[in-house]
Image (spheres, helix red, strand yellow):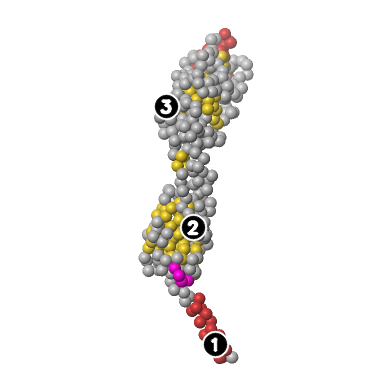
């Protein structure tokens, strides 16, 4: 029995020693052969054994810095011609993500010798395939179609040209656009095309309308929209506008702007492809007494007024705010003079005959009494008169009357 146990122990020790008998890999014969720093599959690093012998990566390290604090290999055996592939945050793999704007991969052996692989900015093909980057043992690389764990494909050939099928010089062989696209339609002229309407709150949601007031069909390609002069929000593609036609974009819709228009007031910057700009000013959004959110419509000179919303259609007549509730002296504000004016007409019983009598029925009950005086005094003291019609903190009711059209 004792002899069997002794023999068994010797065999186990022998087998254990065999399992760790592989020679350590040699840096340069094993190297980073492919990496991806964005896309599907996620970030990955591929290591290839280009040597003629099986070897172990035990003690080798991977990181995206020379501090080498990310990942240390265990007893990973690589046969000649074999690959190891690690995906970011996977079990027994690296954790530090590879920057899509470019990064490095540091591969070190157990003695601390290192090879550094440079990753360029991640790129994708026209059909949305994120390219990987493949490398030889000397660290030289190129963009390739991703093949983790398999032999690398040939370097991806970038064919530069116009990739827009609507352009007159569209190149069907091109797979990288160089900005050279040309169109049969002439470019629109700023001021002939302009922001003709916008809404910064309500139903419909925020929208911007562009109108072609010129006499010829034109393209908005290269024009830009934003709510700041940084012009980082939206750039038009080959949008064709016939004379008298409209383009309407809704916030966050496909092929439209994303930066919301502030309900307290904002600007819309409309620029041509040469960087010339027209800026329109959006006033505070307001609603009628029956809850209709007004849009704001503009002429080619940027002059605007409140209108009923008509996105994609001719603008309606300007609406006039003829009666601000509580503004008895018609000075555009709310103060003790309005309280005195209301008290006087209530006491005299002649509010209905006053020039601004429509502003006196504060509580909307069809009459003029002490309750209206109390309501007005409360909002003046709280400095809450002039809030939106749907804002319980204040009052901003008004009557509207049609005036001239802003485009007239």
Q: Is residue 332 above or below residue 65?
A: above
Q: Secondary structure at mark 3?
A: strand
Q: Secondary structure at mark 2?
A: loop
Q: Is residue 299 above or below residue 30?
A: above
N-terminal label among 3 and 1: 1
Residue at the spot x=52%, y=60% of the render? 150
* x and y, in percent, of residue 332 in the image: 48, 18
Which residue is label 1 attached to?
7
**Classed neighbour count for the residue bearing mark 3: other residues with Cα under 10 Å, few (<14), some (14–19), many (≥20):** some
Q: Is residue 291 visible?
A: yes
Q: What's the mark number on residue 277?
A: 3
Which residue is label 2 attached to?
152
Q: Is residue 395 visible?
A: no
Please name which of the two marks, 3 or 2, marks the residue nearer to the observer.
Answer: 2
Asked whether the beta carbons under mark 3 and mark 2 sit within 8 Å of each other, the answer is: no
Reply yes or no: does residue 52 show up in magenta.
yes
Front one among 299 and 329: 299
Residue at the spot x=50%, y=60% of the render? 151
Residue at the spot x=45%, y=21% of the render? 191
The region drawn magenta spans 51-56
Quarter of the picture containing the N terminus is bottom right
């Amino acid at each position: 029995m004792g002899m069997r146990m002794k023999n068994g122990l010797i065999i186990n020790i022998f087998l254990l020693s065999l399992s760790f008998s592989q020679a350590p890999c040699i840096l340069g014969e094993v190297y980073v052969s492919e990496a991806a720093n964005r896309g599907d599959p996620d970030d990955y690093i591929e290591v290839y054994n280009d040597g003629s012998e099986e070897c172990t990566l035990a003690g080798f390290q991977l990181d995206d810095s020379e501090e080498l604090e990310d990942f240390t290999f265990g007893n990973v055996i690589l046969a000649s011609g074999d690959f190891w592939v690690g995906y970011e945050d996977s079990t027994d793999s690296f954790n530090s993500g590879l920057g899509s704007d470019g990064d490095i991969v540091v591969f070190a052996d157990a003695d601390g010798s290192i090879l550094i692989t440079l990753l360029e900015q991640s790129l994708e093909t026209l059909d949305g395939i994120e390219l990987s980057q493949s490398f030889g043992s000397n660290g030289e690389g190129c963009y390739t179609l991703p093949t983790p764990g398999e032999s690398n494909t040939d370097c991806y050939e970038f064919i530069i040209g116009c990739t827009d099928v609507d352009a007159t010089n569209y190149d069907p062989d091109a797979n990288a656009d160089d900005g050279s696209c040309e169109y049969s339609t002439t470019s629109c002229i700023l001021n002939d095309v302009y922001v003709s309407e916008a809404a910064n709150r309500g139903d419909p949601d925020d929208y911007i309308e562009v109108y072609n007031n010129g006499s010829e069909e034109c393209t908005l390609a290269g024009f830009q929209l934003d709510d700041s002069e940084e012009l980082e929000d939206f750039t038009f593609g080959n949008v064709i506008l016939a004379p008298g036609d409209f383009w309407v974009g809704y916030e966050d819709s496909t092929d439209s702007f994303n930066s919301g228009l502030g309900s307290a007031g904002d600007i819309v910057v409309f620029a041509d492809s040469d960087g010339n700009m027209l800026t329109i000013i959006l006033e505070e959004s307001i609603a009628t007494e029956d809850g209709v959110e007004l849009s704001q419509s503009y002429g080619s000179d940027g002059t605007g007024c409140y209108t009923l919303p008509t996105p994609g259609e001719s603008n309606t007549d300007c609406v006039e705010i003829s009666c601000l509730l509580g503004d008895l002296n018609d000075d555009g504000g709310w103060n003790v003079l309005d309280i005195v004016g209301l008290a006087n007409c209530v006491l005299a019983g002649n509010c209905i005959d006053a020039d601004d009598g429509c502003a006196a029925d504060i509580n909307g009950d069809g009459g003029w009494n002490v309750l209206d005086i109390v309501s007005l005094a409360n909002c003046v003291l709280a400095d809450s008169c002039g809030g939106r019609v749907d804002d319980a903190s204040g009052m901003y009711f008004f009557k509207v009357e049609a005036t001239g059209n802003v485009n007239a």
